[in-house]
Image: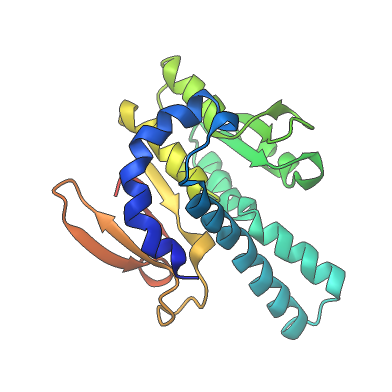
Amino acid sequence: LFAPYLLREQFDERMDEEIGNFFDTYEKQRSPMILPFLIFGLLTCFVPLILTYVMSRTLLGYSHPASFLLGCIMASNTPIAYPIVKALHEQGSDVTAILGFRSKDLVILEDEFRACSDRLIVMTDDGSYARAGNVTVPLKEMLEAGERFDEIVTIGPLIMMKFVTAAAKPYGVPVTVSMNPIMIDGTGMCGGCRITLVDEEGKRTTKFACVDGPDFNGYE
């Protein structure tokens, strides 16, 4: 579980040079740093899935299929973004929502997001529904076309949030990242959601997503 934290320094050094290659075509990516990316991806998927499944079975008494389904929904992180989008829409903000899924059969809450978004873009990795690609593709296109946003809120796998932040940085758009995916016990005792923030002056500060977040400045 702690392997990603040990690898963080190494993959941060390589991140800048990898960003350009990623946006050109991630299919051609042959970087050795793909290993920590995969570790992060597995953690952000299986930790919420397993914890939700266990709690659904033990505390709520749900069946195996219902508990597994609920775990899959929570692992997608999409439900976490919905109340944010809904609240912004209700206060009169112009909301653009970009949802990303692996395939058509995993798409959830599309109608709910559409009802509270001024513009909704759905992406699937395999192109089985809506537009093919990941969420950074339309975001980068909109920014390059001159569209301006007051703030970008990104919630999902850590590597996805990393590249969303990288896409927004040249345009100076504030980015809020949600570290919900790495939270485990929610009390600050296990240390599993420990992160290091680095401000503009290079000062490092240790925080815990569960007690200090879960939302942080993406540029830190």
Outermost residue, left side:
201
Q: Is residue 57 left or right of residue 48?
A: right
Q: Position of residue 216 (x, y in %)?
A: 36, 54
Q: Position of residue 88 (x, y in %)?
A: 50, 43
Q: Is residue 183 above or below residue 176?
A: below
Name the residue: 50% across, 20% down: 141
Q: How many marks?
A: 0
- Who is closer to the viewer here, 30 or 194? 30
Q: Is residue 149 above or below residue 52?
A: above
- Who is closer to the viewer here, 179 or 14? 14
The answer to whether residue 2 is visible is yes
Name the residue: 27% across, 66% down: 206
Q: Position of residue 77 (x, y in %)?
A: 61, 54
- Who is closer to the viewer here, 206 or 23? 23
Name the residue: 49% across, 42% down: 91
Q: Is residue 113 above or below residue 185?
A: above
Residue 215 location, quadrant: bottom left
Residue 166 location, quadrant: top left
Q: Position of residue 8 (x, y in %)?
A: 37, 56
Outermost residue, bottom side:
58
Name the residue: 33% across, 26% down: 171
